[in-house]
Image: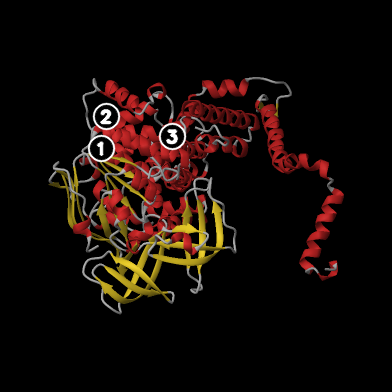
Amino acid sequence: MTSQAEAVAPRSSLPVAVSVQKVDMTFDGFQAVKGASFDLAEGRFLTILGPSGSGKTTLLRMIAGFQRPSAGEIFINGVPVSAAPPHKRSIGMVFQKLALFPHMTAAENVAFPLKMRRFDANTIPERVKRYLDLVQLGPYADRRIHQLSGGQQQRVAIARALVFEPDLLLLDEPLAALDRKLREEMQLEFRRIQRELGVTTINVTHDQREALVVSDEVIVMDKGVIQQNAAPAQTYRTPANAFVAGFIGVTNFLSGKVVAVEGANLTYEAAGEAMQGHWSAPGAPQLGATVTGALRAEQIRLAASVAELSACQTVKTGVVTDAIFEGERIVYEIALTGAPGTVLRAFDHDPVTHKQFAIGETMAMGWNARDVLTFPN
Amino acid sequence: MPKSAYLLRWRVMDGLEALVAAIWPRHFHRALPYVMLLPAVLLVLLLVIGMIQIGDSSARTLDRSTFLPSDFYTAGNYQRIFTDGLYWSILWRSLLGSVIVTALCLVFAFPYSYLMVRTPSALLRKFLLIALFLPFFIGQVVRAYGWLIILGNQGVVNEMLGLIGVAPIRLLYNYPAVLFGLVQYMIPFAVLMLAPALTAIPEEMESAANSLGANWWRTFIHVVLPMARPGLVGAGLVVLTLSLTDFAMPAILGGGSQDFIANAIYDQFFRTSDQGMGAALTLILVGVGSLLVGVVFTLFGAGTLAMGRDRK
């Protein structure tokens, strides 16, 4: 959280479209959102990522106008909107369950916001057609909602949310219910449409892959607090804290007491063994303090013997407790020798040429000190 | 494990299953649904026999000198009904009354059901549910007498009016009193039929309409109302048929001056003992009711009363 300032990506010089300032939300004494602040530039695609109960949906609903912040203010194009009801805001929203109107056809659904917002009746059919074409649904205009497939319904929902050219597009986990293949297809579709129209977009999801694939910026939330706000790659490479490191990617955690400090490099004792790490939080590590080291599964080199890993700064051995063949990789779970109960996850990214180790076999693991991102506990 | 070690309950169940298998062999299983349908079919069949009997009586006029039905078939009873203005006015009063009662019930039941379904307060929901079921513990006749006490010339309402110097108003024994009693009686039925239909409308639909630019009124007109149609049709049909055939409210709150068809039928059977005339009126009531339901079905679909996949 405190490293947020240094982690923020270089912003475009575009004007700020959405500004959330010190927003709190309290329900019956429970604080769902605490002091959330961020700015989003025009035309950017932001994803708010977090586990369920992290406050991400509450934040989105406040921006949409379905809930009023307990404290703080939300600005859209510089105008404070907290007091405005949803229908007075210029926001298109795609809902989790889409909320398409079943008593209307696809075209009538798309025409609905235009009629409600009093667009010139003569221009409505042309505009509806243009947006149905944009989502490649031109031939399905007169179908009822239940006559469309899941993917087609998604497209109607997108067209309906965009047809009145809102200042802001909100996506409330609309892809969560789709099967994986369709979901990945729709993620790219969202990105294509968003780029084509240049509409500022805020997407909410618990799917870390989706956050990395579709967004220009990612906000990670936990327990109602924004943990990090940065570009996707930056969030992955330099997580602001142990929560972010654990939520995105497959991460091993090794915690222990600091025994030596040398600049940003430190040595700490984890599971009875000395561990080299790289300090990844603001300030400096203190001798004797408990720290947590985060080591990505893909940063661990694997070999049959210690001798083959001479290039690595830290080399350990362990016994394979599970080996899962996933096609493009093998996932190993390896119990660290001399540290009972400490199991590391590691990937072999070449399952075609490498032999798969069996459960019970001993393997060598190696990594470098800079791969172990250490955070205060 | 020896069989005797099993729980006694298990052994009893095993024995029962063996018994069922012995008296109801497996290849009879396909007939099971039809067998289970039998009691209901028999009950309806009995009513059909009654209908045939009524059809027979309706075609025989009463001989005033012998007080016996004619032993030949004649359309006399129907002729009398369709030429006598009295029956036309009773028919018209029943039809108009049931339509007005249905409309009022739907108007009053809708906000009640909506609040009951949507309120975030569990306490309020329980209160509304209890308030809904409480009247069912009091029969229709008792309720109608209750209204006599409240609305009578020396009733509570007129006494209160007397306190502020208003002369007693005749609140009973007129058409509005009957309709009032019917509406009060039918609202719980309408709410019960409407609530499931409103529950079936996801709240997200209303949020979506809001975010697309519709205020609450337009959300109601363009989204909630059309989506509630199955419930409105179901509730409407129930209230319509129950009001059209109602007896107690017109009899008690109408005081004999506001007869519905059911009252006319009663009079024929038990006052003038003209069974044929009563039977003819009964068949006309069944015909008019069926016609009305048929018209609603073709115009709006069967609503929540329809089963199966292709219900609209």
Give the labeled residue for mark 1: B213
Query: Residue A247, percent across and down?
Result: 37, 58
The amino acid type of the residue labelled 1 equals Gly
Q: How crowded is mark 3: few (under 14 residues within 10 Å), some or many (20 or more)?
A: some
Viewer-proximal residue, A163 or B94?
A163
**Residue A196 sits above or below residue A69 on the image:** above
Marks 2 and 3, Cα distance to the nearest angstrom? 25 Å
Query: Residue B298, percent across and down?
Result: 50, 25
**Residue B9 sits above or below residue B43 on the image:** below
Where residue A115 is drawn, which disc sits there?
2
Where residue B162 is drawn, which disc sits there?
none
Position of B70 with respect to A215 (left or right) is right
Query: Residue A109, percent across and down?
Result: 35, 31
Residue at the image position 30 percent from the left and 71 percent from the top: A266
Residue at the image position 22 percent from the left and 30 percent from the top: A118
Viewer-proximal residue, A79 or A350?
A350
Discs 3 and 1 share one subunit: no
User: In front: mark 3 or mark 1?
Assistant: 3
For disc 1, the chain is B
Secondary element under disc 1, as helix, strand or loop, is loop
For disc 2, the chain is A
Position of B50 with respect to A39 (left or right) is right
For the N terminus of chain B, the quadrant is: bottom right
Q: Are marks 3 and 1 in contact (CB under 8 Å)?
A: no
Discs 2 and 3 share one subunit: yes
Which quadrant of the figure has residue A314?
bottom left
Secondary element under disc 2, as helix, strand or loop, is helix
Marks 3 and 1, Cα distance to the nearest angstrom? 25 Å
Where residue A151 is drawn, which disc sits there?
3
The amino acid type of the residue labelled 3 equals Gly
Q: How crowded is mark 1: few (under 14 residues within 10 Å), some or many (20 or more)?
A: many
